[in-house]
Image (spheres, rainbow, N blue to C red):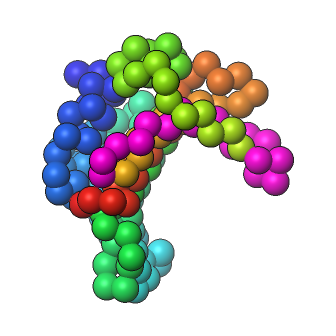
Amino acid sequence: MSLLDTVAELVKKRPLDTRAVEDAFDVALRQDADNTNPYIQRFLAFRRPAELRSVEVRVPQGAATRKGPIVVVDVDGEATNIKQADVLAQFGEKPAVEVPTPAQPPDSPVYLSYPQPWGTLRFGFARPSTELLTSVVIDSDKLP
């Protein structure tokens, strides 16, 4: 299954939790106690496929106002060779385009953003060339 197929299947699962992320991306997560606080419990992959540079899951807890977790997957663009055209073909031709502000670092990605009933699905593309996928963000801030 391709990375885009994996993402498409994962976002259908509710509630989205660490086990679903581990199974979908074939990773092993562990809590990052140094970066966990009363609002967010943070998990990082300590075992992952080579084409994934990192996988992070932030799960709301206690006093958090958000409803569900955020999943951030940093991708080796050269290894996966996923282009904007691939994302547009699978997820739709009319995403919102999020361009970094001048205040952000110059290598901040450009995102294709797809609003969903549960939150937002974003695909990041590196600059200055925005051809290859470098990150996927599943932000389920409306529903778990």
* Picture residue at 22% right of the left edge, 54% below the top: 16
The residue stretch that appears in magenta: 101-118
Main SS of the magenta segment?
loop
- Does 27 sit left or right of 132 as displayed? left
Image: 33 above or below 20? below
- Does 115 sit left or right of 99 as displayed? left
Image: 76 above or below 22? above
Q: Nearer the viewer, residue 4 or 119?
A: 119
Where residue 135 appears, as percent x and y from the top left, is: 50, 38
Q: Quadrant location of residue 92?
A: top left
- Does 106 sit left or right of 143 as displayed? right
- Report the number of discs: 0
* Picture residue at 46% right of the left edge, 78% below the top: 34
Q: Quadrant of the C terminus?
A: bottom left
Where residue 102 appears, as percent x and y from the top left, is: 83, 47
Q: Nearer the viewer, residue 114 or 102?
A: 114
Where residue 71 appears, as percent x and y from the top left, is: 38, 52
Where residue 66 appears, as percent x and y from the top left, is: 37, 69
Q: Is residue 24 magenta?
A: no
Q: Quadrant location of residue 6?
A: top left
Q: Nearer the viewer, residue 103 or 94?
A: 94
* Picture residue at 30% right of the left edge, 21% below the top: 2
Is residue 143 something one can see in this rendering?
yes
* Picture residue at 37% right of the left edge, 51% below the top: 119
Which residue, as the protein is rendered here, is positioned at the far right? 102
Is residue 81 something one can see in this rendering?
no
Q: Is residue 105 magenta?
A: yes
Image: 103 above or below 66? above
Q: Quadrant location of residue 60?
A: bottom left
